[in-house]
Amino acid sequence: REQVTNGVLGEIYVTTARALRRCGVPGWGVFTNKELQGGGPLIDIGIHMLDAAMYVLGFPAVKSVNAHSFQKIGTQKSCGQFGEWDPATYSVEDSLFGTIEFHNGGILWLETSFALNIREQSIMNVSFCGDKAGATLFPAHIYTDNNGELMTLMQRELADDNRHLRSMEAFINHVQGKPVMIADAEQGYIIQQLVAALYQSAETGTRVEL
């Protein structure tokens, strides 16, 4: 986010957030029950890549949302990477694809799935395309050039075995009134608003203005 804020990528006009599983329908709990769960991959895994993308972009103002969802595999098959489920009661989407248009002219393309016939077992990443450089989050790379020579700048990967402990400590500090939280309630509200708009657009087949 610091690199984006400092203008290293320039004007970011296309962002792609992907949370895809090849055959990864959760076979436990209520993940396949729309009434109880609220939705499928968008609300379970896609929301995390959407949140990461919006955070790095600085939560730009959203103009409109357009989405399409599909239920093609979960109602036919009954087992996958994460156990078995009942195809007869499978009521969430297999996959959802959406475009979020910002008032600044940029777009965010979102792809998410529990089950999709792709090569990889799982894809979880966000990519950013700017007019000066591009970047991915996982791994944290920047793609640019120097006088015509293509370059990939890589962030050194450091082991972090205490990240969950630090998350709990940050939560406790925040409860005690110390301003340490990276994300605030307003950002959480925006993400929930986007998820609701994506589902609304997919269900109605119309663009949703925000």
Image (tube, rainbow, N blue to C red):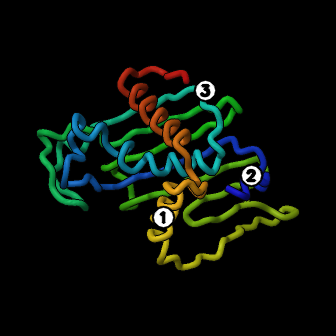
| Mark 1 lies on residue | 167
Disc on the earlier residue, 1 or 2: 2
> Which quadrant holds the N terminus?
bottom right
Q: Rate crowding at label 1 as few (under 14), some (14 to 19) or many (20 or more) other CA atoms within 10 Å.
A: few
| Mark 2 lies on residue | 5
How far across and down, in percent of the image, does residue 136 sit?
61, 59
Disc on the earlier residue, 3 or 2: 2
To which quarter of the image does residue 206 belong?
top left
78 sits to left or right of 7: left
How far across and down, in percent of the image, does residue 113 sit?
36, 47
Front residue of 95/150: it is: 95
Residue 182: which numbered mark, if any? none
- Helix, strand or loop for disc 3: strand
Tell me what residue is drawn at x 15 percent, y 50 percent.
Answer: 85
Task: State the residue lying farthest toward the right.
Answer: 147
**Amino acid under disc 3:** Lys
**Amino acid under disc 1:** Ser
